[in-house]
Amino acid sequence: MSESQGEIVLELRNLYVGYYKDLNILQDLNVKARKNQITAILGANGVGKSTALKAVFGFLRPNEGQVLLEGEDIIDVPTYHRILKGLAYIPQQPGIFKDMSVEENLELGGWTFKRDKKQIAEKMEANYERFPVLKEKRKQITGELSGGQQRMVEISRTLMAEPRMLLVDEPTAGLSKMLSEEVYEMLIMLTEQEGLTILLVDQEIRHALHISDYVYVLELGRNKFEGPASDFDDLEKAFWVA
Ligand SMILES: Nc1ncnc2c1ncn2[C@@H]1O[C@H](COP(=O)(O)OP(=O)(O)OP(=O)(O)O)[C@@H](O)[C@H]1O
Ligand SMILES: [Mg+2]
C-alpha cells in the first residue's frame, strides 16, 4: 500500500519527547497511522519506541511537536479524555489485576466508561468469542492463568472500552510461538473485521513485518526508514546497515 493511501487516524508530528526537560529521547519523530491498518514502529532496544507510545497516550508530555488524533491536537487532552475519544493503550508492562477474576478484570474495563449492564455483557461475550479459553476460566483468579492467557485478559479488557485507535507495545513478549501467532492473528482481525487502527511497537521484527501495512524504523530516537512493509523484505538492508 502506498504512503499516500488511507485516512490518517493518528499522527505524531515533529515530536520531541524526553524524561528530562533538556534531554529529548525522541527527536523530530514523524509517524502516521492510517485507518484499518497496522503501522509498526521498529528499532533497537532503547531507541524510544515505548516512549513514543507513552507520549501518544498522555503519560509523557512532549517538549515540542504535535500528537493529532483524527486531526485534533491532543497534547493538552488528559489521558482519560483521550480514552473517551477512542484511544487505547496496551503497555509493554502488563497491567492486569492478578488477584481478581478474569470476569472482574473485563468488567472493570467496561465500567470505567459507565456503560450499561447489557452493553458490558455483550462486550464480554464478544471477548469470550475472541478468546474462548477466557470464558472457560472466567471465574478463575487471573494470576493463576498462564502468561499467554493473562495477556489475553489484558487485551480483552482494553477492548471493553471499544477503542478505534489501539497502541500496542510488544504484545507477544514472553509468549510461546503458538500464543504469539494467536495474538498477531487477533490484531489482524481487529483491523480487518472490527475497523480498528493499530500502532504496533515490536521486537519480533519478522512477525511485525508480516502483519503490518506500513513500517517506521527508528534510530537514536529519529526516523531512519519508512515504507510499506513489503519494501522491507530485505531485512539486512532495513535494519542492520547503518
Ligand atoms: N522512566 C524513564 N526515565 C528516564 N529514562 C527513561 C525512562 N524510560 C525509558 N527511559 C530511557 O529512554 C530511552 C528510550 O526508552 P524506551 O523504553 O522508549 O525504548 P524502547 O525502544 O521501547 O526499548 P525496548 O525495545 O527495550 O523496549 C532509553 O534510553 C531509556 O533508558
Ligand atoms: Mg519498549
Image (cartoon, grey):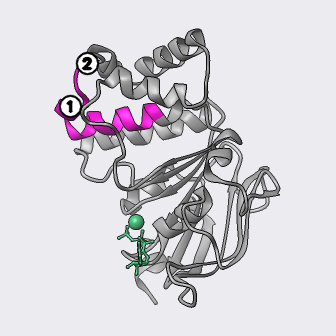
Give the residues in magenta.
140-157
Expressed as whole percent of the image width and height from the top left, the position of residue 129 reads 43, 17
Say the numbered circle drawn on residue 235. none
State the image coordinates of residue 121 (x, y, percent, origin top left): 51, 12
Q: Earlier in the sequence, mark 2 or mark 1?
A: 2
Q: Residue at x 63, y 67 (%)?
A: 227
Under mark 1, the amino acid is Leu
Residue 6 sits above or below residue 242 on the image: above
Q: Is residue 203 visible?
A: yes
Residue 14: horizontal and vertical position, in percent?
71, 77
With respect to residue 121, does 179 lie above or below?
below
Question: Quick check: 88 above or below 126?
Answer: below
- The disc at residue 137 is 2
Q: Main secondary structure of the magenta part?
A: helix
Left or right: where does residue 70 sit relative to residue 141? right
Question: Is residue 89 left or right of 174 when viewed as pictured?
Answer: right
**Residue beneath label 1, please?**
145
Across and down, in percent, residue 242 comes to: 46, 90
- Alpha carbon distance from label 2 to label 1: 8 Å
**Residue 133, picture quadrant:** top left
> How many marks are shown on the rendered structure?
2
Q: Secondary structure at mark 1?
A: loop
Asked whether the residues under the numbered discs 2 and 1 touch, taking CB atoms below 8 Å apart as contact, a structural biologist would say yes
The answer to which image quadrant residue 92 occupies is bottom left
Ligand 1 falls in quadrant: bottom left
Residue shown at 54%/79% (left/top)? 18
Q: Residue at x 39, y 59 (%)?
A: 206
Mark 1 burial class by Cα count in 10 Å: few <14, some 14-19, many 20+ = some
Mark 2 residue's CB less than 8 Å from ligand 2: no
